[in-house]
Structure formats: C-alpha cells, structure tokens
C-alpha cells in the first residue's frame, strides 16, 4: 500500500490540508479560509482556536472524500505562517489571540532593545555586531518579528504575559495541539533573535542550534518561556487520540516537527539545491534560495537564516503585500460589498490581456501595509500613479499585476547581490502562479525564465510532506528537485525589456520621492 502524509499548510488568509504521497505527489487537498483581525495602531491578530477548528473540519472532509485508505496515512506534518506569537498557558491553551507577522505594535519595543548612542541604520553598534556575529541577522525595527510581539505583550498586555507559560510560533503551537509536546524547530525560532545560528555538529553527527545566553540577556526574554529546540525533521511525538479523532486519521502516527512557510515553500518548489531560486506569491511574497553561508545585509533587511535542511541556510526576505493587492482591487475597488464573482481572478487575467505592457503608463505601487525588504519601512503606502481619465479596468488590473512584479524586481536585485550570482531560472509557486498572464509578466519584468511549478497552490503542503518523507527515511533532500514537476516555462519577451526598465526606474523613484511624506502622514500622531 502506498503511504501518505497528512500535510497542513496554515496561511494567513487561507488554510490548505492535503494528502501527499511520500514521493511528493498531491493526491487530494481541501481548503478553508482564515479571518484576520486588523486592530488600531498596526495590530493584526488571529484566534488559534479558529485555526484548529478549521484544520479539523478541513482534514475530516478531505479524508472522507479522498478515497485514500485511512491506514495508509503514515505521518502528520505542518507548515504555517512565520513570525507569529501564540501565548500558551500552563494548560496548553492560548491565553489570548495570536499576534501574527503583520502586527507592528511592537515597533517601540524593537527600537528600545536595538537602539543606543552610537548607531548604524538605527542599531547601536555593539548590539549590531553581537547580533550579526551570533544570529546572522537583526531584529526588525518594524516590530513585526516574534521578539517584538513578546515584548509588546510584556509592556502592553501584562496580564496575558503573566499567564503565559510558553511563547510558540503558529506551527509549533499546532504541534503542541497534535502531540501535547511543546517544541520549536531551529528554523522556526530564528525570528526571536536569541539563538546562535552557527550549525554545530554534536556527538551523534547531527546539526544543532541553541539559545545564546548573552542575547537572552540583551533582549530581556525569559528563557523559561521559550520552548525546547529540535530539528525540522525530528519526530515531535505520536498523534494524540483526541486530535486524531478530530482529524479523521489514525492515532499514534508520528508528527514531524515541520517548518515555517518560507522554508516549506522552498522544498515544495523543488528548489533545494544551493542558489536554486523560487518566487512565492500569496498574500505576501518572497524570492529566495538556499545558500551555504551565513551572511547579513542590514541596508536591505536580508539575512541568511537556518533552513529546514540541517547545516544549510536560506536567504530570508519578505514583501508585505502581493496577492493581497489583487484581493484589495477585487473587494475594495472593482467588486465592493461582496459582489465579486467566483471567477474574478480569471476575469482579471482576461482584462489584463486587454491592456498593453506598461498598462498605458499607469503604475501601481503595492505597499499597502508597509514594506520589509529590500527596504524596511512600515510607514510607506501604495497607490496608482499617473492615473488618467483614459484608464479603464483592464489598465487597473494589469497595473496591479505589474506593480507586484516590479516590487519583485527590486527584491531580485538585492537577493542576487546577496547571493553573488544571477538567479535564473526562477521557480514560481503560490496562488499567483496559477495565472499564466502573471507568469509572463513576471518573466518580462524580471528578465528571467519563470518555471511555473505544477499545482503551485499546494507547494507548501508538498514541502511539508516531503520534509516528513525525509524524516521517515523515505526520501533525501537531494532527490527533491527531480520529484517536483514544472508545468510550463515562460521566457522573457525581449521586446518589453526597455519598457520595463524605464517603468522600474519610475517605480523606485516614487518610493524615494514620497517616503518622507508617508512618514509624516502615517506616524501615529498624524491621525490623532
């Protein structure tokens, strides 16, 4: 009997649960939605209980409909949104809502622990040196890292902080719910910025990473509130009977530690070799690859952090708004009041083909929730530029597609400088990769071959399952690239090269000319 992994992919606005063969084939999948609460002052929260209810409901539906024998399900593996904080009480239950990666309320706390008299890019020089030497990166001053969430809770929700036994990333909280054991993986803990991220080989020949006492003192985090560390491929424990009953799978099967979404996406795209790049476009976006070195670029907010693959690193970056910009256009501009047709995104593709490359001079900047890389700026905001009475819906749609691609071009330049080489081809995954029009726009704007991965929406679930296959000894990471199918390749159209070069220059110019105005408009005092 062929064996399968139940793979859970908890995104920000969408949840996917899939049954995946140990060879990486998606056999069946189901989806559900997740609700985000946006709060004053930059808050963004979700209820972990809603996560679990959606996962249980979706998994039970999947198992019942898939036709896959329940006895063939050999393991559970989770991946989830990264840089989130679930405060867990002594009973293992959340004491309040989770603070997710979009939340910037901890910016004052991040500034407090990173600042000082002698500063570079806002960081006190001795702190900067210690963090870079030890972790390979730095806490973001935007307040969106896990460390800032915890410190914000300490200062602004002291009752919840007092009742918290452990702070867990979303993926690690799911594993606690599945097994009763609270751990974090070496990759998921990285954005707490309190680990020595130099891989160390222990007496058993295993790559390990541990907490750094000096960084714990520097940040003020209580080490007693942080979980035990394990490898992404470790078995956390057997699946609890109660959880198994809700999921509709056998009790006692192994639960793999798993990895956050950036790392699972790299595996699920098939890009597991050094310098093999992939682009993800979902709610947010990133462009990354595995590298054999630890390095930091503080000017562009990029660092190489521990990967799910032991002993390896990946280039960590993130752009805040990608597919969410298209959702904004659908729900707030073109189809308000919930009137969007079910095939709205297909209609968008048709509209985009009716507008010429360059959208008739209309440029969209997708900074609707600030930006992380290649600039860290939570004040910047997006918009349509050079808008005229001649612009129609096709121009608006194409401008949004091109704007997200132009932002990716900005990031690509920074990532290639960091990697020290040209990244070509680039594998493309996520919901955005379903659009053939967007695939070609990315190829033209980036000037790179785009490899559209088959079943791109389930890439994270595929990655989580293939990680589990490695954990079970059924697969090696070196075999992954050949197991992931590329559906189609898109080559850049040379006829559009000069046009997009000019548009890109204007795109960067909009940021440079307007960033001070956005600071003035979006500081908290500006709205008071």
Image (spheres, rainbow, N blue to C red):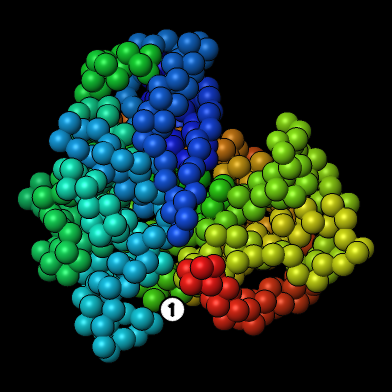
Image quadrant holding the N terminus, namely top left
Task: In the displayed orientation, state which residue is furthest to the bottom.
Answer: 118
Q: Is residue 54 left or right of residue 172?
A: right
Position of residue 317 relative to residue 517, above or below, is above
Label 1 Cα neighbours within 10 Å, binned few <14 / some 14-19 / many ≥20: few
Label 1, secondary structure: give it. loop
Q: Position of residue 35 (x, y in %)?
A: 50, 38
Q: Residue at x 66, y 41 (%)?
A: 434
Q: Quadrant of residue 242?
A: top left
Q: Quadrant of residue 88?
A: top left
Residue 287 in view in this figure: no
Q: Is residue 436 left or right of residue 89?
A: right
Position of residue 245 relative to residue 172, above or below, is above
Q: Position of residue 166 (x, y in %)?
A: 19, 44
Q: Residue at x 30, y 67 (%)?
A: 109
Q: Quadrant of residue 315?
A: bottom left
| Residue occupied by mark 1 | 299
Q: Nearer the viewer, residue 35 or 229?
A: 35
Task: In the displayed orientation, state which residue is furthest to the left.
Answer: 203
Q: Position of residue 235 (x, y in %)?
A: 22, 33
């Amino acid at each position: 009997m062929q064996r399968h992994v139940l793979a859970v992919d908890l995104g920000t606005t969408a949840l996917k649960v899939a049954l995946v063969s140990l060879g990486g084939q998606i056999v069946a999948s189901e989806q559900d939605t997740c609700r985000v609460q946006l709060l004053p002052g930059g808050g963004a929260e979700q209820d972990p209980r809603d996560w679990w209810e959606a996962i249980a409901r979706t998994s039970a539906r999947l198992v019942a409909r898939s036709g896959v024998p329940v006895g063939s399900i050999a393991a559970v593996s989770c991946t989830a949104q990264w840089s989130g904080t679930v405060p867990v009480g002594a009973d293992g239950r959340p004491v309040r809502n989770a603070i997710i990666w979009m939340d910037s309320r901890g910016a004052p706390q991040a500034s407090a622990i990173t600042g000082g008299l002698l500063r570079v890019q806002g960081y006190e020089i001795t702190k900067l040196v210690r963090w870079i030497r030890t972790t390979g990166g730095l806490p973001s001053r935007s307040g969106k890292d896990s460390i800032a969430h915890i410190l914000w809770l300490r200062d602004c929700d002291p009752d919840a902080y007092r009742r918290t036994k452990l702070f867990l990333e979303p993926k690690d909280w799911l594993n606690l719910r599945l097994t009763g054991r609270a751990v974090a993986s070496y990759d998921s803990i990285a954005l707490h910025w309190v680990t020595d991220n130099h891989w160390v080989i222990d007496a058993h020949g295993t790559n390990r990473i541990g907490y750094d006492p000096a960084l714990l003192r520097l940040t003020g985090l209580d080490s007693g509130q942080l979980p035990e560390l394990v490898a992404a491929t470790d078995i956390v424990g057997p699946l609890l009977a109660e959880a198994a009953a809700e999921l509709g799978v056998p009790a006692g099967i192994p639960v793999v530690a798993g990895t956050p979404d950036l790392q699972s996406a790299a595996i699920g795209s098939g890009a597991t070799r050094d310098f093999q790049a992939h682009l993800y476009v979902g709610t947010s976006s990133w462009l990354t690859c595995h590298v054999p070195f630890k390095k930091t670029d503080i000017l562009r907010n990029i660092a190489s952090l521990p990967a799910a693959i032991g002993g390896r690193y990946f280039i960590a970056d993130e752009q805040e708004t990608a597919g969410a910009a298209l959702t904004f256009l659908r729900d707030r501009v073109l189809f308000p009041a919930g009137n969007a047709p079910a095939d709205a995104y297909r209609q968008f593709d048709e509209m985009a083909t009716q507008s010429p490359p360059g959208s008739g001079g209309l440029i969209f900047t997708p900074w609707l929730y600030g930006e992380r890389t290649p600039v860290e700026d939570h004040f910047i905001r997006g918009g349509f530029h050079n808008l005229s009475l001649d612009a129609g819906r096709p121009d608006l749609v194409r401008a949004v597609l091109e704007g997200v691609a132009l932002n990716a071009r900005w990031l690509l330049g920074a990532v290639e400088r960091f990697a020290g080489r040209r990244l070509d081809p680039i594998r493309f995954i996520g919901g955005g990769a379903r659009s053939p029009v967007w695939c070609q726009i990315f190829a033209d704007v980036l000037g790179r071959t785009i490899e559209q991965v088959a079943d791109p929406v389930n890439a994270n679930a595929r990655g989580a399952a293939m990680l589990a296959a490695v954990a079970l000894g059924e697969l090696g990471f070196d075999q992954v690239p050949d197991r992931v199918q590329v559906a189609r390749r898109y080559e850049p159209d040379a006829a559009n090269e000069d046009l997009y070069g000019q548009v890109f220059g204007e795109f960067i110019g909009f940021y440079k000319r307007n960033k001070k105005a956005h600071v003035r408009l979006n500081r908290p005092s500006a709205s008071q």
